[in-house]
Amino acid sequence: MTVAASVAGAALYLDSDPGGRRRPGRRERIRDPVLLPLPVPEGFQLVTDETLGVAFPVPYGWKAGKRTAQPVTYTEETGLSELTIGVVGPAGSHPLAHFEDIEANTKTHYPGSHRRLWMQQTTFRGQPAAVWEFTFRGRARVFRAIDLGYSREGEREYDIYLSAPDFDGDAYRPTFDKVRDGFSADVS
């Protein structure tokens, strides 16, 4: 089961304790990274998806999934961690409202399968955005996901999403951050 039907990632500076953990109840700040050209992080390759009009870094060794719909998915070699980039258009009033709708639908159709860790309205690259981190129950284990959605109403909403087994969630956060920081929209 994939809870993240339209999911995303964000450029986050986290309020954290000395151990690097996010402190509950603290507001997250999103920074606006520089747009193209962006350097590709070491250990990553740049992927351009003309169908979505986006470019983003993907870790070496991660494989593109079989594409049956608009989002593009990459999976690391164990098949347990997944990166999804999606575009929704036209966007609704705010990405936060979109995430709240997805969450409500998930609770209705998959009771008890999802637990919100946090969800927050913010901005990303000068546009309205939302960040959502949650856990969800897969067939054999619990997964942790982080999602960033950003858009202006009536335009395209871009989503950057990463999920990993819950016990590895913090280990995959740097991957999410590098994908988010290197993400570019409206490329062709």
Image (cartoon, rainbow, N blue to C red):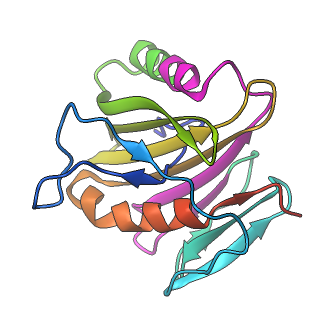
Position of 184 compared to 155: left or right?
A: left
Measured from the top left, where is residue 90 in percent x and y? 80, 28
On the question of residue 124 being in view, the answer is yes
Q: Is residue 54 left or right of residue 101?
A: right
Regarding residue 7, the answer to whether it shows in the image is no
> x%, y% of residue 89?
79, 32
Which of the two residues, 155 or 101, is positioned nearer the viewer here? 155
**Quarter occupied by the C terminus:** bottom right
Residue in the image at 39% along x and 17% along y: 107
Q: Residue at x 47, y 71 (%)?
A: 76
Tell me which corner region of the image, top left, top right, bottom left or bottom right, holds residue 115.
Answer: top left
Q: Nearer the viewer, residue 105 or 124?
A: 124
In terms of depth relative to the viewer, which is nearer, 29 or 91?
29
Q: Where does residue 67 sit, x and y in percent of width and height?
A: 73, 55
Q: How many marks?
A: 0
Q: Which residues are magenta?
A: 72-101
Name, please, the residue furthest toward the left.
18
- The vertical placement of 13 against 103, above or below, is below
Residue at the (45%, 15%) spot, across then down:
104
Q: Is residue 174 magenta?
A: no
